[in-house]
Amino acid sequence: MRSSAAAWQLIPVWMHCISIVASVLGVIPSEEECVEKLIELLFRCDSSLDSLFAVTVQLFHRTWREMHASHDEHDKVANVVHEQLRRAANHRPTNLNMLEDLLLALPYWKMKELWKRELIEKENNQLGSEVVG
């Protein structure tokens, strides 16, 4: 663990990662449509749950660094990690390596671009559907 002021604490990170994995897998009631996709992946892997947890912790660490997060931003990073995992799962990865590759393609800067594009599309759709008079 890093000793800088921006270092994340192990136990809170693990708790967030457990919560993310449990939520995405449907262990905790969730409205996630990616649950079945990740469950399919888990049945294809030998050491599935611990491997998925390890991937989630690594993703949390990578995203933390990319966001330049401070010690009190665990929730913010966890929300981004959850969204990264959800988007990757929607591609229906057939193994853990494919999931990791999909996650590598979703760094924080890419997520910000996707959110910006989605916001613009949403605003354009709303403007297009409103009656201007």
Image (spheres, grey):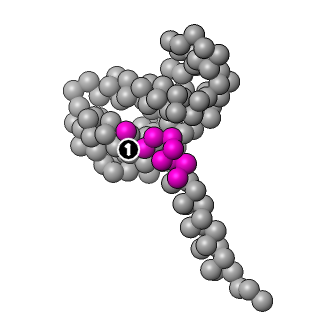
**Is residue 47 shown in magenta?**
no
Q: Main secondary structure of the magenta part?
A: helix
Residue 101 rendering spot, x and y as whole percentages: 31, 40
Q: Please give left or right for residue 53 compared with residue 9 in the image.
A: left
Q: Residue at x 62, y 20 (%)?
A: 6
Residue 14 rendering spot, x and y as whole percentages: 50, 20
Q: Is residue 1 visible?
A: yes
**Is residue 108 shown in magenta?**
yes
Q: Please give left or right for residue 2 compared with residue 70 in the image.
A: left
* Image quarter of residue 40: top left
Above or below, comparing residue 13 to residue 128 in the picture: above
**Element under disc 1:** loop
Q: Quadrant of the C terminus?
A: bottom right
On the image, numbered disc 1 is attached to which residue? 105
Boundaries of the magenta span: 104-113
* Image quarter of residue 129: bottom right
Above or below, comparing residue 101 to residue 17 in the picture: below
Q: Residue at x 28, y 44 (%)?
A: 93
Residue 115 rendering spot, x and y as whole percentages: 56, 54
Q: 8 or 49: nearer the eye?
A: 8
